[in-house]
Image (tube, rainbow, N blue to C red):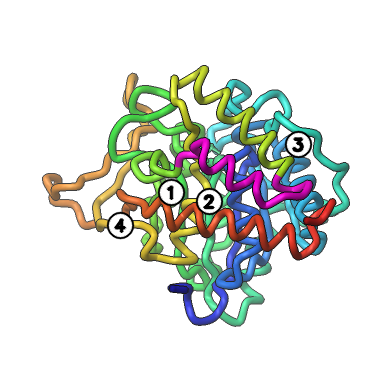
Amino acid sequence: MDLSPASPVPLLLDCDPGHDDMFAILLAAAHPAVDLLAVTTVAGNGPLEAVTLNARKICTLAGLDGTVVAAGADRALRGDRRTAPDIHGETGLDGAPLPEPAVPLADEDAVTLMARLLAESDRPVTIAATGPLTNVATLLERHPEVKERIERIVFMGGSAGRGNTTPLAEFNVHTDPEAADRVLRSGLPLLMCGLDVTHQALATPEIFDRLHAIGGLLPATLGGLLRFFAGAYEKVYDMPAPPVHDPVAIAAIIEPAVVRLVDAPVAVELAGEHTRGATVVDLHGVTGAEPNVQVALDLDADRFWDLMLDAIRTLTDRGALGGA
Ligand code: RIB
Ligand code: CA
C-alpha cells in the first residue's frame, strides 16, 4: 500500500556523503513522493572537497545527471573540523571505484542556493539534513526571510540515549553542536531521526543479497561500498550489520508511517566537559519544557528496506550507468 504524500514534496537534501548519505540521495532522487530540488554538501564524514566530489560521483553513477550539487561549509560554526575516516575511509566513500563526476558543481554556494530555491518555490520546502547542521543553521541566520518558506527540517542526528562519537554524542550533532542548537531553537517544525531509530536500519546479509539480486553496475557498486561500511562498523563498533542511518530521514518524509514519532523537548549540550554535543531528549516531560521536536523512536525496517531497494531498482532500470 502506497502511503506517500499526495503531491511530491519539494526537498533540499543537505549531506556529507558518506556511505549512508549516498543511500539518502538515491532514495530522495528515485521516489515519486519527493521532488529533489538540490543536493548541498557540508564537511562531516570527510572534508568538504571530498564529500562534494562524492555527491557528484554518486549522482553520475546513478544517472542523476540533472541534479544540482552545491558545496557549503568546510568547518563547524566554531571552526572545528572533524571527519570520520575510520568509518567512511580516506575518500569519505571508500569501497568501490566510482565514475569521474559528470554532474557539475553549482556556481552558488550551498546556503545561497538553498535561500534562492526556497524563495522561488511555489510551495513550502522540506529540508532534509543528514550531516552536521552547519549549512542549515547558517541559512536560518543569514536568510531569516526564508524561514516561512520552510515546511519543516527532517534531520538525521542526535540520540535519545547513547552516542556513537562520544559516549553520549552522535557524530552529526557532535561535529557542530552550536549549529544543532540554532536549529533546535529555530521554532521550525523539526523531525529528528536519531540513533535510536537509525540503528534499526541494519544492512543484514539478506539486504546484501536483495541488493545483489537487482543486478547491474549500480547495485554492484553499492554492494562494494556497503561492504566497506559494514567492515568499518564491525571493526569500530563490533556491529555485525551496519546501520544505514541517513535514508531513514528520507523514508520518514516519503512514508510517515515508517517511523513511530513522539513529541519531546530536545536540547543540545554545549558546555559539558564530558557531554558536549549530546542531545537531551526529555521523553517523560520531566523538564516541563515545551516539546520542540518530533522524535522518531521506532522503524518499520521491512518497509524501510523495501523503499530503499525499490529506489535502487528504479534508478537501475531508469538508466544508471551500466544499466540493469
Ligand atoms: O552518526 C551518524 C551520522 O553521522 C550519519 O549521518 C553519518 O553519515 C554521519 O554523517
Ligand atoms: Ca551523514
Q: Position of residue 161 (x, y in %)?
A: 28, 35
Identify the secondary structure beneath mark 1: helix
Amino acid under disc 2: Pro
Identify the secondary structure beneath mark 2: helix
In contact (CB < 8 Å): disc 2 and disc 1: no
Q: Residues within 10 Å of mark 2 (few under 14, many from 20)?
A: many
Amino acid under disc 4: Arg
Q: Residues within 10 Å of mark 1 (few under 14, many from 20)?
A: some
Q: How far apart are the two marked residues, 4 and 3, measured between alpha carbons?
A: 36 Å
Q: How far apart are the two marked residues, 2 and 4, measured between alpha carbons?
A: 16 Å
Front: mark 2 or 3: 2
Q: Which mark is residue 260?
A: 4
Q: Which mark is residue 49?
A: 3
Q: Residues within 10 Å of mark 4 (few under 14, many from 20)?
A: some
Please name the residue that numbered disc 1 is placed on. 182
Please name the residue that numbered disc 2 is placed on. 247
Which mark sits nearer the N-terminus, 2 or 4? Answer: 2
Q: Position of residue 113 (x, y in %)?
A: 70, 61
Residue 232: say if magenta. no
Is ligand 2 within 8 Å of the beta carbon of the residue shown at mark 3? no
Q: How far apart are the two marked residues, 2 and 3, measured between alpha carbons?
A: 22 Å
Q: Nearer the viewer, residue 53 or 120?
A: 53
Q: Is residue 305 above or below residue 224?
A: below
Identify the secondary structure beneath mark 3: helix
